[in-house]
Amino acid sequence: MAPQFSSYTKEELIKKLKKQKTLAIVQGFLLLLMIVFAIFSTIEKGVSFQTFLPLFFAPMLFVMLFEMKKIKQELTSRK
């Protein structure tokens, strides 16, 4: 199986990496806010769905970071 990013040009990879970095920062910030609100919600109202909501969104951030790592590896292999 060919690598996922081998069909992209170097410029497309750089553009995709910039976009992924921006989205990862935004998603990380939103996940942090969700964690803070979950803590306050748990303190005020007890355990509810909001308590576990950040756990459902955390894997998406890790997948995005893993994809960024693959893009960086592809860029370094082309130099």
Image (cartoon, rainbow, N blue to C red):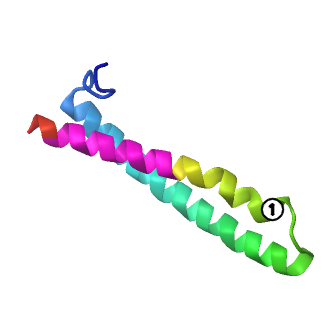
Q: Residue furthest left?
A: 79
Side of 8 where 31 appears, left or right: right
* Magenta span contains residue 72: yes
Residue at point 68% right, 73% down? 36
Is the N terminus in the top left, top right, bottom left or bottom right quadrant? top left
Give the vertical position of 17 relative to 51 (above or below): above
* Magenta span contains residue 7: no
Is the C terminus in the top left, top right, bottom left or bottom right quadrant? top left
Q: Position of residue 28 (x, y in %)?
A: 53, 60
Residue at point 26% right, 40% down? 14
Disc 1 secondary structure class: helix
* Residue matched to label 1: 50
Q: Position of residue 42 (x, y in %)?
A: 82, 74
Residue at point 23% right, 42% down? 73
Side of 30 where 16 appears, left or right: left
Q: Mark 1 Cα within 10 Å, few/some/many (few <14, many 20+)?
A: some
Q: Residue furthest right?
A: 45
Give the vertical position of 66 relative to 3 (above or below): below
Tally of marks: 1
**Residue 32 in which image quadrant:** bottom right
Kind of residue sitting beneath label 1:
Gln
Q: Residue furthest front?
A: 1
Magenta extent: 62-76
**Residue 70 in which image quadrant:** top left
**Residue 43 in which image quadrant:** bottom right
Magenta: main secondary structure: helix
